[in-house]
């Protein structure tokens, strides 16, 4: 995923690259347990996640690489663009 923000105040646009592999990492059971360690019913929450559906979502996102999700331009020249 790529996020690009352009404003008149900045000399160059802000670009944030977020690889799909990081998304897969954040939904893994081990990482979720560490992220949600202060939640009382972590095991119950993790058991409710459908990992087969998530795998299909990641596969679809990989096929749709380059698809523009958001492209907003304001009157003041600010622009935000998010692509897969």
Image (spheres, rainbow, N blue to C red):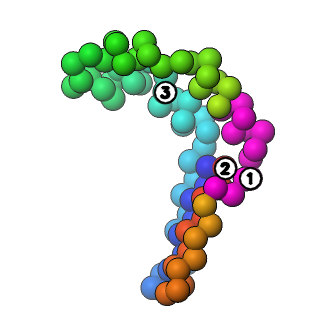
Q: Bin the neighbour count of mark 3 within 10 Å (Cα to Cα): few under 14, some 14-19, many 20 and up.
A: some
Query: Can you tell which mark lies on residue 27?
Result: 3
Question: Which residue is drawn at the image coordinates 74% and 53% (left, top)?
Answer: 66
Q: Is residue 49 above or below residue 65?
A: above
Residue 78 is at least partly visible in this image: yes
Q: Nearer the viewer, residue 5 or 73?
A: 73
What span is colored magenta in the figure?
58-69
The reply, left or right, for residue 27 in relation to residue 66 is left
User: Under tag 3, what secondary structure?
Assistant: loop
In space, the residues marked 1 and 2 are separated at their CA atoms by 5 Å
Residue 7 badge: none
Q: Earlier in the sequence, mark 2 or mark 3?
A: 3
Coordinates of residue 83 in the picture (x, y in percent): 65, 55
Residue 55 pos. (x, y %): 64, 24
Q: Which residue is mark 2?
A: 84
How far across and down, in percent of the image, does residue 65 sit? 74, 46
**Marks 2 and 1: in contact by CB < 8 Å?**
yes
* Spatial CA span between label 2 and label 3: 18 Å
The mark found on residue 66 in the picture is 1
When asked about the image quadrant of residue 57, the answer is top right
């Amino acid at each position: 995923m790529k996020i690009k923000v352009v404003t008149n105040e900045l000399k160059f646009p802000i670009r944030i690259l977020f690889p799909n592999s990081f998304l897969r990492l954040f939904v893994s059971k081990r990482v979720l347990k560490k992220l949600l360690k202060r939640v009382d019913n972590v095991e119950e929450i993790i058991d409710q996640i459908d990992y087969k559906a998530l795998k299909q979502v990641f596969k679809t996102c990989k096929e749709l690489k380059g698809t523009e999700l958001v492209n907003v331009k304001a009157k003041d020249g600010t622009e935000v663009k998010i692509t897969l």
